[in-house]
Every structure is written in C-alpha cells, then in structure tokens.
Amino acid sequence: MAAARARRAGASLLSAAIRHRSSQSSSPQPGLVAKTSLTSPPWPEVKLPDPVEEAKYHAAEVVRKVNGLISAGQYGRLFAVVHFASKQWKITSEDLIMMDNVLEAECGDRIRMEKVLLVGADDFTLIGRPLLGKDLVRVEATVIEKTESWPKVNVRFWRRHNFQRKKIIANPQTVLRINTIEIYPCLS
Amino acid sequence: MVVLSAARWVRSRLSDRFWRVQEVLKYARHFRGRKNRCYTLAVRSVRRAFVRSTKARREKKRFLRALWITRIEAASLEHGLKYPAFISNLVKSQVELNRKVLADLAIYEPKTFKSLAALAQRRRQEGFLAALGDGKEPEGIFSRVVHHHY
C-alpha cells in the first residue's frame, strides 16, 4: 500500500516538472513514466507459479509419491516433534525423555501423545499447521520411572542486612520411553 | 539430698560439632585454596556459591534462548534468509515450532530445516505480492489460514 502511494506521488511530481518546463510539449504517454528509486518495490520481482497448476501438481505428484512411500513402508527411522507437558520435544523411537513434573499415569502405563507438530523421515517431512491429524500419526510412550530430582539448594542472601534464607527443592520428575512413531497413508 | 535445679557449673556443650562442620565443608571440597579446608573461609564461599547458582538458574533460560536464536540465524543465513524473516514467515504460515526445536532440527535434520526455510521464503514472496497487488486477486497458497474445529 505504501509502495503504491509513493509511486503515484513520484509520477505526479514528474509530470508537474515537465509542465513547468515547456507548455507546448505533449503530455507523456501513460507507459513512459521515468524510473525513480520508488517506481518499483525494493525487493526483487518474483513470479510465483500459477495456483491452479500448482495445486494440480501438488495433488498429483507430491501427495501421491509421499503416500506411496508411506504405504510401501520405504522410510527409515521416523522422528517427530511433539508438544507435551508444555514443552516441545524432538523424539525418535527408543528415546528416553525426562520431564520436570508429575504425570497422573502409573509406572508401566502406555501413553499416546496427541499433539504432534512435525513428522519426518529421510526423504519427506510432514509439517503440521500447527498440528498434524490424529489419524495420520501415532506416537506411543511408556512411563518408566517417577522420581525426584537431586536436592537443589536455593539461597537468598543480602549482605550487611542480616538476611539469609535457605530452601532445599526436590522437583518430582517422570521418565518416559518413546516406544513407536507410526504414520498412516491418509494424506489428501 | 534432693536437688531441685541443675547445678550452675554444668553447661550444655555441643557434641556433634564435627558433623555440623562437615555439612558445610562437603560443598566446598572442590574449591581452590584454603577455603576447601578451613571452616570460616568455607562458610563464606559456600554461601556465595549457593547464591550464584540460584541466580544462574534464572539466567540459564535467557542464555539458552539467545544460543538457540544464534544457531537458527546461522542456519537460515546458509539458506539465504535472515532470522526475522524466517521466524515471522513461519509464524504466519501457522507452524508453531519453538526455537529449541528449530535449533535441534538445524543441527540434526538439515533437510527438514531446508524445507522449512523454503516454506518461509515462499510465504514471504506471497506476502510481498499481497502487499503490492491489494486487489481481489488469487491469494498465495501458503498464505491460506487453516481453520481447525476442535
């Protein structure tokens, strides 16, 4: 919007200058505005591909190929980015994760993590906007251990004011083992 | 004879002084100089060490975030994008990955990071076209907002 406005102001200034210089010259044709620093935007001109054609290409080539790869099982190790316990984790199978909180599941319970943001293999990546569908990915984990952290010492001290407080904090921690990450070929 | 009150010359004296001193010295064993042996010097050093570790636990979060941002900036410059452009265009494309995960992807999953950079670049160009045209023209594909109904 600002670029368009600047362009119009530049053109009117230029035509006013020409009018001032010679009253008999004909007005410049609409295609021949002089090139100033503001006639074109400062970023390079880029031509994007046609949206209809691109949608066709995407549906036909990309989705079909990726679906084929997934259903044929031609991917190696999958990694996923999962949002769990208000943190994002980049996980693979057979991974150990330790979080600084209490889970309401017993040790040995199998958990399914539902908020998956990204899944990737060697040849393709599925990026969720922001999440991927639950029918597309399945991430399973087991609760292994529920313990406390090492006793952290919190000391506040203010010199020359006779102020010292000492507190020992042991946060509860949970350890999860990621069992599997599975994807199903239901892209569209 | 019946004694109703304790005799005056009996004072209560510490019997576990050793263990009270060891409680402090055990935190000072890896220090340098006399403060790892002498109690008076060790008390002061241990107190300063605890205060510094308490404050450092709050600064660690800021420090790590700055580190992730530096790494993401370096990786996106390798793909020809600056950090503000990369992050803002990713957010506009509704990709909610945080900086910790982006830095990990930049290190361990270079192909995925390259695809994210390409996505951000494409969204950036669609943004420029939308700013220029500003008419009812076909909008870019990657600028379409996905609506989820939960």
Image (cartoon, coloured by chain):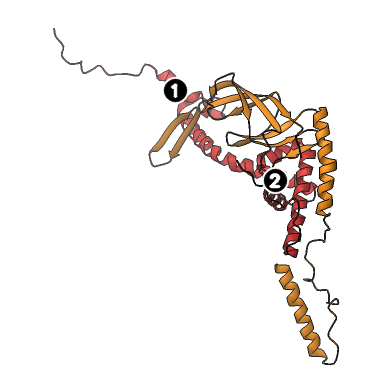
Task: Give the chain coloured orange.
Answer: A
Measured from the top left, where is residue B40 in percent x and y? 45, 29
Q: In what element is the residue under mark 1?
A: helix
Q: Residue at x 15, y 14 (%)?
A: B4
**Labels 2 and 1 within one chain:** yes
In three-dimensional space, the C-alpha distance between marks 2 and 1, rounded to whole angstroms, equals 45 Å
Residue bearing the label numbered 2: B70
Q: Nearer the viewer, residue A96 or A47?
A: A47
Type of residue at label 2?
Thr
Rendered-image quadrant of the C terminus of chain A: top right
Question: Does residue B78 sit above or below A3 in this rendering?
Answer: above
Quadrant of res A63: top right
Q: Colour of chain B?
A: red
Q: Which chain does the residue under circle 1 lie in?
A: B
Task: Provide the chain ID for the residue under circle 2.
Answer: B
Task: Determine crowd level at label 2: few under 14, some 14-19, many 20+ residues with C-alpha closer than 10 A.
Answer: few
- Residue lying at the far top of the rendered structure: B1
The amino acid sitting under disc 1 is Val
- Residue B34 location, x and y as percent? 53, 28
Choose the circle earlier in sequence order: 2 or 1: 1
